[in-house]
Image (cartoon, rainbow, N blue to C red):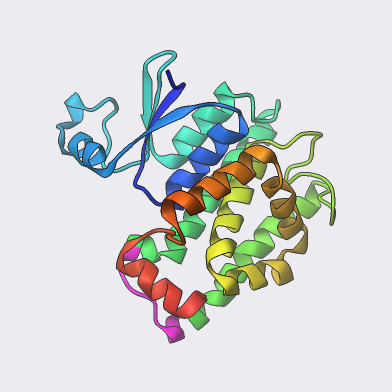
Amino acid sequence: MSDFDLYYWPVPFRGQFLRGILAFAGKTWNEHDSDEIADLMGKSPGDQPVPFMGPPVLIDRENDFAIAQMPAIALYLGEKLDLLPATPEGRAASIKVVNDANDVIDELTMDGGREMWDEEEWQEFLPRLERWMAIWEATGRAHGLGDGEGYLLGGDEAGLADVVTAVLWSTMAERFGQIASLLERAAPRVSALVGRMGQRPALARLASDAKERYGEAYCGGEIEKSLRKVAC
């Protein structure tokens, strides 16, 4: 039996952070298809395993605990799987990285597709995306991240912040050439960290599996179509 149940759509996007954390920690999980997700979403809040509006939802089979919202799930897994720093400051910094990552993908998809990208809007957005990358780079540099060594928040081992960072930027960079080039230029140390993390067997397998299962898909729908017109 798998360690966890994960409810998320068959695309990388927000759910890939959680897949990355689970894979990195060597855990197993069972994914549910779109029909099962829709069925769960259609239940009244009192009949859901945790009251929620949309996926991701994670169920920990060991203690029958369910939680929704990507940052909350990441915090839970970070605590449970010992992927967070020992200090309150380090844990807060880690969760800031998770929430920043959540903000980046919201902005990249125009709040989940409320609008569609055109070339003018994309060009206006690029400096903001570059600033996000600079935020990651400054964070890493402040904690001793080097060109070929170190971790985003320092320490001797990779943790939650490193996994989330790797998943965020590698998933986008693999699918959108402009983003890959911008990351290398704006955040070279973070780009190198993402590359090192991506070489770890668990994350390399996850990326390969994502390509096999989802192809070049990122977030899906019309918003991805518009994003591909401006960012590839």
Quarter-wise, where is residue 24 in the image?
Answer: top right
Q: Which residue does the image show at 18% across and 37% down from the upper left?
A: 39
Rendered position, 104 above or below 18: below
Residue at the outermost top position: 63
Q: Is residue 81 above or below residue 132?
A: above
Work out which residue is located at the far bottom of the displayed protein and give it.
Answer: 120
Q: Is residue 93 visible?
A: no
Left or right relative to 149: residue 182? left
Image quarter of residue 78: top right
Picture coordinates of residue 184, whole percent (x, y): 71, 68
State which region is magenta: 113-121
Q: x%, y% of residue 92?
A: 61, 37
Observer-nearest of 195 and 109: 195
- Estimate the x, y position of residue 106 in percent, counting from the top left: 43, 58
Q: Is residue 104 above or below residue 176?
A: above
Say which residue appears at 69% left-offset and 35% top-offset: 90
